[in-house]
Amino acid sequence: MPTAFLWGRLFSSVQIVLFLTSLPLAAQWFTQEIPLSPGWNGVQLCVQPAQDECAVLFSNTAVEKVYWWHRTGAGMEFDLDPRDPLPRSADWNYWFSTNAAISSFGSLVAGESYSIRVADNAAPFVLRITGKPVLNTIRWIPGEPNLVGLPISTNWQISFSEFFSFSSDFSINSSTATIFRISGLTDSPQRVWTPATELARGGVAYWITAGKNARDYSGAIQVETAPSSRMLDFGDSVSPRSLIIRNRSSASRTVRIEHLASENPPVSSGFPALMGKTPLIYKPLGDLSGGYQSLPSLLVTNVPGLSQLELSLAPDSQALAGGVPGSTWQSVIRITSGTASDIQLGVSCDGSLSSQLDPAGLWVGSVSVTHVERAPTRIGADNVWKDDGPVSVSEPYTFRLLMHVDAAGTPRLLQRALLAYRHDASETDTTASLSTNGILTILIDEKDATAYAAQHSNARIVRVSSTCFPIMDPLPMSGTFGSSNTLSALVTLPYNDPVNPFVHRYHPQHDNLRYDNGVATNQEEGVESYTVTRDMSFNFALLDPVRGIANRQWGVTESGGVFEETVAGLNKTIRIKGTFKLERVSRVSEFGAMEQ
């Protein structure tokens, strides 16, 4: 079965040229056209069929039987005798159109190779199979003939010798019997006598003898994904995934990466409705200087010899509007390099992402401060920062962080939130637990909580707060919440606020009061206490800084990035840097509103 491979991450700089052009239609749903002639036909299936049953695929055709070479044991035979009702090797599975009872398989699998027998008196025809293109990497059985298809175009042709010239594991020449065709009325495969001039075609299966060290060769260009899969299915996540393109040849190669639209899903198939072409953003992995940008219809790049290019791809969250559950954005990525390679894989993400990417709701998390710097200032002098910036602290310290995003997308920084939960009496479920069948309301003031509790005697109210901020109303923030965006907030601690660091309730020299004959009066700012400002910046990351692409909920129910802060008003101005992470605990978008 096809497999993926792990390669070292040797990233070389590439020059990328973008072209926007009209391209032929391809798809996550793609129809593979398979020409069939009377007699035997060697076929590689390049798509996973929407309807994979042989009885359906070959109905109303002249196909009599299909043999599937499925290597299972030692030793093998690839010559078939049509006079025998069953193949003579245990490495064959078989399907008969006229006798399903003795068939050993009933469905076709993408990436596999088949020998299809068409009635001798039939006219040639084209079998059209609609399915999803997937990565079909060859796994060779060393030292033996393998029935395989080669990842090359059905239109662009390359000789057998040239295709295998980038690997030393194959002996492809006119003096060795290493390549055979399956075609025509003859019962035995036909030898390819002049591999240097005879052309191979995509979608056709050949018998090719592999060298004793052959394992994973698929031509000059090989493609895989990380995490490993046969498609780029993002599901309900916007977390990036990697597309790895490896150049197996010693010379630099021009590689074309086409992003193509999808055919419509098969009618009455039960497959998700097509929302349109999957909007993608990309950047070369390891490129720290640039950000993500939209993936064009055609990207042309040079991959140095014996090197690889790794692109980080993700759905463009800004372009996923209008999706609904049960639908998907679908497209295909096609990778070609001259006539040497033609590789396709489907790309999709769920329509439900539209609602999930809406950040509305309450987010709770923490900030971890890892770097601090103090400016060596004095009264009347400007801040002077060291060139090396904040330095690492001996041990990080954390504080709780609360944010709320309303239905209009306005983010607010909270000091506290009171979560009021009550049982929904309209539900008929007999459970008495408040953990189910309930209504959640977000309150921001203790007076509101008192009134709510008086109105709903069965309510349970929990306060979530951050002691690192003053008692304050929700503070509107500047910017946009979410991946690759930045939020900023300016928190002011008045000189007479109880949490101001210059004010100590039980220290007479730091209570900001003046005593005259035992009478206490408030002092002006600058005598004992000073106003402190905290200028904070939250730079959201597209990728989870800890788990990377493995975190499929990043950008949906989890978010975070880099935290920066400048504290002014103390003896010395302080710069702070670290990370922050938030988790959505509720989708309630308005204070005082209810969520069932």
Image (cartoon, grey):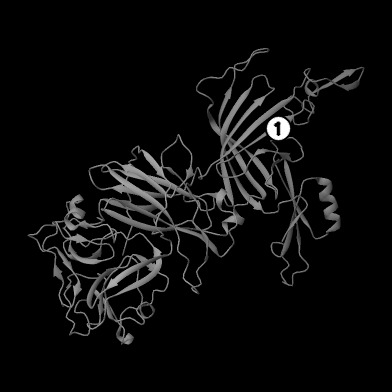
Q: In this view, does 500 lie to the left or right of 261?
A: right
Quadrant position of residue 93: bottom left
Q: Is residue 358 above or below residue 116?
A: above
The residue tagged 1 is: 491
Quadrant position of residue 163: bottom left
Residue drawn at 35 percent across, 48 percent down: 256
Q: In this view, does 512 lie to the left or right of 349?
A: right
Q: Indicate the amino acid at tag 1.
A: Val
Residue 238 position in % (x across, y down): 52, 51
Q: In this view, does 278 lie above or below 485?
A: below
Dot 1 crowding, Cα within 10 Å, few <14, some 14–19, many 20+: some
Quadrant position of residue 80: bottom left
Residue 46 position in % (x across, y down): 33, 64
SS type, badge 1 = strand
Q: In this view, does 22 lie to the left or right of 441?
A: left
**Between residues 432 and 30, which one lies in front from this camera angle?**
30
Residue drawn at 73 percent across, 67 percent down: 432
Query: Could you tell me if residue 90 is visible in this image?
Result: no
Residue drawn at 67 percent across, 54 percent down: 587
Residue 537 position in % (x across, y down): 61, 34
| Tag count | 1
Residue 44 position in % (x across, y down): 29, 67
Q: Is residue 399 above or below residue 49?
A: above
Residue drawn at 71 percent across, 69 percent down: 431
**Between residues 38 and 572, which one lies in front from this camera angle?**
38
Task: Say which quadrant the N terminus sits in.
Answer: bottom left
Query: Could you tell me if residue 413 is visible in this image?
Result: yes
Task: Say which quadrant the C terminus sits in.
Answer: bottom right
